[in-house]
């Protein structure tokens, strides 16, 4: 059985809502066993008023975390890394607590404080202060360690970008290469993800792309074009660029077991409760349980100017990638979540 029909009209309705709520543009691409369903609304660029298109590249924010986790789990397959080993075994002296393990870092259970809470407490000033900055990962970890930890290691789920900055450091230490090389050689090239790039610390999105617009905290204030930035504040936690079609390909390959061994995919899918009902987190991977009883697997992303949803069915045969080119607009973020039901549950139950 191929599952419920994709409700394209329902997807279009969600995109229209996102526009009404302040997104300049939004688009969604669903692939189901080779059949592509796509919808787009609004503009990729407010200056030219050009429509959004699924060949447009954009910043995927924390969907990067799934790519970073895949590289580390491949290193586990290669016996170069042990998930339950302390981070300090591989990065001596980095963390003040030898009990913090690689698994806790990849599952947001390390207790390490998220430095972006302070960095972006004031949305536009915070962004402009770091837009062109280049950080070393060590600097970002130091920012985190200035604040108390949120829990003892392993005690609870607490989302923190710090964890995936450390995950990127582990990739570089264990391979001797920059994360860019490892993304390229292990994921991008094998899957022919021609729209996927790690250009940090460059600020330009290569080729054809959607511009991203940051919504200021002050109601009614004009949108800020946030397209050009280094995303050095995120690195392995959020600096990848991709497209809806590449995210479809990536998640399908991951869930079909083409990127790691079955054993490591099972590790990624060892679910623990995360924030909110019907949600769980594994290792760099979210599970969301939909109203129709279907669970989907992937990640969300929020980076200045872009909200991304990238999810797949358990067997990887149906995938969704959706993006709106605004951020700091919680209504749009919640609305874009509503693409999941029409994509995976089909017609809304009457
Ligand atoms: C948990 C999330 C939603 S937030 C986290 C990460 N993004 C960030 O940590 C950046 C947050 C600041 C971005 C900014 N917001 C502010 O400045 C607010 N003052 C905006 O909206 O552009 C990502 O991506 N993750 C999403 C995820 O994993 O789903």
Image: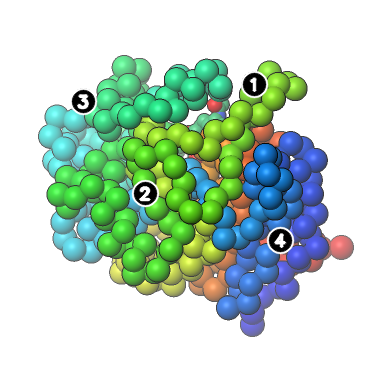
Q: Residue at x 54, y 64 (%)?
A: 245
Contact between labelled residues 2 and 3, with CB atoms less than 8 Å apart: no
- Asked if 252 appears above or below 184 in the picture, the reply is below
- Residue 72: image x %, image y %? 28, 54
Write down the residue under mark 3: 96
- Other-residue count near label 4 (Cα within 10 Å), few / some / many at <14 / 14–19 / ≥20: some
Q: Earlier in the sequence, mark 4 or mark 3?
A: 4
**Residue 217 numbered mark, or none:** 1
Q: Residue at x 12, y 34 (%)?
A: 92
**Residue 198 numbered mark, or none:** 2
Count the marks.
4
Q: Residue furthest right?
A: 350
Compare residues 4 and 173 and report the one nearer the observer.
173
SS at mark 4? strand
- Other-residue count near label 1 (Cα within 10 Å), few / some / many at <14 / 14–19 / ≥20: few
Q: Earlier in the sequence, mark 3 or mark 2?
A: 3
Q: Quadrant of residue 268?
A: bottom left
Label 1 within 8 A of ligand 1 by Cβ: yes
**Residue 39 numbered mark, or none:** 4
SS at mark 3? loop
> In the displayed structure, does residue 149 sit left or right of residue 77?
right
Q: Earlier in the sequence, mark 4 or mark 1?
A: 4
Quarter of the figure with the C terminus: bottom right
Compare residues 159 and 242 and report the one nearer the observer.
242
Q: Earlier in the sequence, mark 4 or mark 2?
A: 4
Q: Residue at x 66, y 53 (%)?
A: 52
């Amino acid at each position: 059985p191929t599952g419920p029909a994709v409700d394209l009209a329902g997807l279009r309705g969600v995109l229209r809502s996102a526009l009404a709520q302040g997104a300049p543009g939004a688009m969604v691409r669903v692939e189901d066993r080779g059949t592509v369903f796509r919808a787009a609304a609004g503009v990729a660029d407010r200056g030219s008023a050009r429509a959004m298109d699924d060949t447009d590249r954009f910043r995927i924010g924390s969907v990067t975390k799934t790519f970073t986790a895949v590289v580390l789990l491949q290193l586990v397959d290669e016996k170069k890394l042990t998930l339950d080993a302390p981070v300090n075994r591989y990065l001596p002296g980095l963390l003040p607590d030898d009990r913090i393990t690689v698994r806790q870092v990849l599952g947001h259970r390390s207790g390490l404080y998220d430095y972006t809470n302070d960095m972006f407490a004031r949305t536009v000033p915070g962004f402009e202060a770091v837009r062109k900055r280049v950080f070393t990962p060590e600097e970002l970890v130091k920012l985190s360690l200035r604040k108390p930890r949120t829990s003892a290691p392993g005690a609870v789920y607490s989302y923190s970008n710090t964890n995936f900055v450390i995950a990127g450091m582990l990739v570089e230490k264990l391979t001797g290469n920059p994360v860019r090389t490892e993304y390229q050689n292990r994921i991008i090239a094998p899957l022919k993800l021609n729209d996927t790039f790690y250009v940090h610390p460059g600020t330009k999105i290569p080729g054809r792309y959607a511009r991203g617009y940051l919504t200021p905290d002050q109601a009614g204030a004009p949108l800020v074009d946030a397209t050009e930035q280094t995303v050095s504040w995120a690195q392995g936690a959020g600096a990848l660029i991709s497209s809806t079609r590449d995210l479809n390909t990536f998640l399908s390959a991951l869930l079909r077991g083409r990127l790691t061994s079955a054993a490591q995919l099972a590790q990624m899918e060892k679910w623990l409760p995360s924030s909110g009902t019907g949600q769980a987190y594994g290792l760099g991977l979210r599970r969301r349980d939909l109203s129709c009883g279907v669970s989907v697997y992937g990640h969300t992303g929020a980076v200045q100017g872009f909200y991304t949803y990238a999810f797949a069915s358990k067997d990887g045969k149906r995938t969704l990638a959706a993006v709106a080119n605004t951020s700091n607009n919680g209504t749009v973020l919640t609305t874009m979540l509503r693409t999941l039901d029409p994509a995976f549950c089909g017609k809304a139950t009457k």
